[in-house]
Image: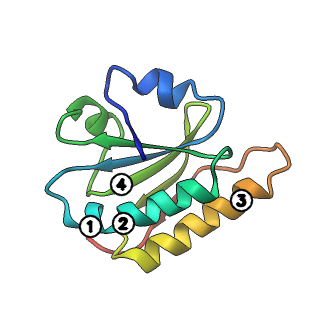
């Protein structure tokens, strides 16, 4: 199950989280959002205590959508200590997302405590 976060709970659940948080900006009308949901749940199971997964309804949380300059849905942000470490947007489907999530999982499972520079992954779909 994915924790649903709103503008009211975003600071506590995401920005102040002791572990990195993968934020899934989605909307009920977004077909790709529904397609990738099972893949995100699988990712959550694999990274249980290393990375937390939360969902944000972009339509109901317009201030967050504007703050994080969403261009398309779904958009995934990996936020650690209040800083965006990875931005995943423009992916075409499960395979693109699977590769990007695998890169994130590997980078966090092999970490030696040092922080990586922020990365934006644009998988080419507009």
Above or below residue 31? Residue 52 is above
Image position, residue 5 (x, y; %): 36, 32
Residues at discs 3 and 4 in contact (Cβ within 8 Å): no
Image position, residue 121 (x, y; %): 49, 64
Residue depicted at 61% across the width and 46% down the height: 51
Whole-Å distance between the Cαs marked 4 and 1?
Answer: 11 Å
| Circle 2: element type | helix
User: Which is more N-terminal, label 3 or label 2?
Assistant: 2
Residue beneath disc 1:
32
Q: Is residue 119 left or right of residue 35?
A: right
Residue beneath disc 4:
75
User: Which is more N-terminal, label 1 or label 4?
Assistant: 1
User: Which is more N-terminal, label 2 or label 4?
Assistant: 2
Residues at discs 2 and 3 in contact (Cβ within 8 Å): no
Neighbor class of circle 1 (other Cα within 10 Å; few <14, some 14-19, many 20+) is: some
Q: Give the residue furthest to the front.
A: 1
Whole-Å distance between the Cαs marked 1 and 3?
Answer: 25 Å
Task: Give the quadrant of residue 102.
Answer: bottom right
Q: Is residue 92 left or right of residue 15?
A: left
């Amino acid at each position: 199950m994915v924790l649903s976060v709103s503008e009211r709970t975003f600071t506590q659940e995401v920005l102040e989280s002791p572990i990195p948080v993968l934020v899934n900006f989605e909307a009920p009308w977004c077909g790709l959002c529904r397609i990738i949901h099972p893949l995100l749940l699988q990712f959550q199971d694999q990274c249980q205590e290393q990375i937390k997964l939360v969902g944000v309804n972009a339509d109901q949380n317009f201030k967050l959508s504007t703050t994080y300059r969403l261009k398309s849905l779904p958009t995934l942000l990996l936020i650690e200590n209040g800083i965006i470490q990875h931005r995943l947007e423009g992916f075409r489907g499960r395979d693109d997302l699977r590769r990007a999530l695998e890169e994130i999982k590997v980078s966090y499972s092999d970490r030696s405590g040092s922080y990586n520079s922020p990365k934006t992954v644009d998988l080419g779909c507009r």
